[in-house]
Image (spheres, grey):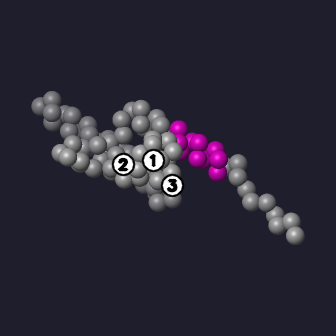
């Protein structure tokens, strides 16, 4: 029963990460986030966001990785909100 409870928790985490990103995931720079904030590949990050099974184990973002991902989103949002293209000078 304990193993079943852990599996249910993993499935809920999988759904909640992917569901929370629904609607914005298509324009997030996932390769950039994976490389610059985690030091990993984009496929590593997608595996965890999607809750993929790798070598018989379901992988998701743990609490620390979720915090890192949230910090990355906030950092990118801050950078984008302060950016603008100037008017052509000539």
Which of the marked residues, 1 or 3, is nearer the chain's N terminus? 3
Which of the marked residues, 3 or 2, is nearer the chain's N terminus? 3
Residue 7, given in percent of the width and then of the height, sits at 20, 39
At horizontal 53% and vertical 42% (from top left) the residue drawn is 72
Q: Does the CB distance between marks 2 and 1 fall below 8 Å? A: yes
Quadrant for the C terminus, please: bottom right
- The alpha-carbon separation of the residues under discs 2 and 1 comes to 8 Å
Quadrant for the N terminus, please: top left
At horizontal 19% and vertical 34% (from top left) the residue drawn is 5
Q: Which mark is residue 34?
A: 1
Q: Is residue 35 left or right of residue 11?
A: right
For this orientation, the residue located farthest to the top is: 2
Magenta residues, start to end: 71-80
For this orientation, the residue located farthest to the right is: 90
- The alpha-carbon separation of the residues under discs 1 and 3 comes to 9 Å
Asked whether 59 or 40 is in front, the reply is 40
At horizontal 64% and vertical 51% (from top left) the residue drawn is 80
- The alpha-carbon separation of the residues under discs 3 and 2 comes to 14 Å
Q: Residues within 10 Å of mark 3 (few under 14, many from 20)?
A: few
């Amino acid at each position: 029963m304990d193993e079943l409870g852990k599996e249910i928790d993993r499935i809920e985490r999988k759904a909640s990460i992917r569901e929370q990103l629904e609607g914005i995931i298509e324009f997030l720079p996932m390769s950039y986030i994976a490389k610059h904030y985690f030091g990993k590949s984009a496929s590593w990050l997608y595996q965890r966001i999607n809750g993929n099974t790798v070598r018989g184990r379901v992988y998701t973002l743990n609490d620390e990785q979720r915090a890192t991902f949230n910090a990355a989103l906030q950092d990118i949002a801050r950078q984008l909100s302060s950016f603008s293209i100037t008017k052509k000078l000539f």
